Amino acid sequence: MQNKKWILGAVLTVVGAVGVSTRPGLTVKAADQMGPAAVKIDNFSFGPATLTVATGATVTWTNNDDVPHTVVSDDKLFKSKALDTDDKFSYTFTKPGTYNYFCSVHPKMIAKVVVK
């Protein structure tokens, strides 16, 4: 039993140190991540609002809302089609920088990907 408590404590410590969260408005840091990273579209928001990834990471957006949304970068570097419920859109970030994006159907929906 004591080993299980130690393992649970270690897992919670790692999760807390990494700063992982799937709630909208919070930042997720995946600075060493080269694989996929996820953004959920739900309740007319992108979650997380700020996602930090390493250069070369692929980000996948999934629409969990009952209405269509898009993913469009401010500089038009990437642009999805209208995503229906459960549709996905992915983009691989090859250069460091901050990429602001929005939903062209609902322009108040904004977020960003920070690539390091």
Image (tube, rainbow, N blue to C red):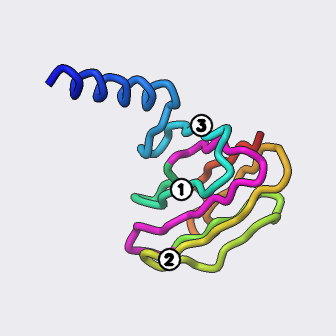
Residue 38's spot in the image, x, y percent? 54, 56
Query: Which quadrant of the rendered structure holds the C terminus?
Result: top right
Residue 27: image quadrant is top right
The relative height of residue 103 versus residue 45 in the rendered view (above or below) is below
Query: Which residue corresponds to mark 3?
Result: 29
**CB-based contact (under 8 Å), mark 1 and mark 3:** no
Question: Of the residues shown, which amino acid type is indicated by label 1?
Answer: Val
Disc 2 versus disc 3: nearer the observer: 3
Q: Is mark 1 on a helix, strand or loop?
A: strand
Q: Which of 23 and 115 is in front in this view?
A: 115
Q: What stretch is highlighted in magenta?
A: 48-68
Determine which of the numbered discs, if any, sits on residue 39 in the image: 1
Point 61% across, 64% down: residue: 103
Point 54% across, 71% down: residue: 69
Query: Which quadrant of the rendered structure holds the N terminus?
Result: top left
Residue 46's spot in the image, x, y percent? 52, 54
The relative height of residue 76 versus residue 100 in the rendered view (above or below) is below
Determine which of the numbered discs, if any, sits on residue 75 in the image: none
Point 56% across, 63% down: residue: 61
The relative height of residue 6 versus residue 19 in the rendered view (above or below) is above
Sort mark 1 into few (<14), some (14-19) or many (20+) by Cα contacts within 10 Å: many
Query: In 3D space, how far apart are the residues under numbered discs 2 and 1 (Cα atoms)?
Result: 12 Å
Q: How many labels does the image show?
A: 3
Question: Of the residues shown, which amino acid type is indicated by label 3?
Answer: Lys
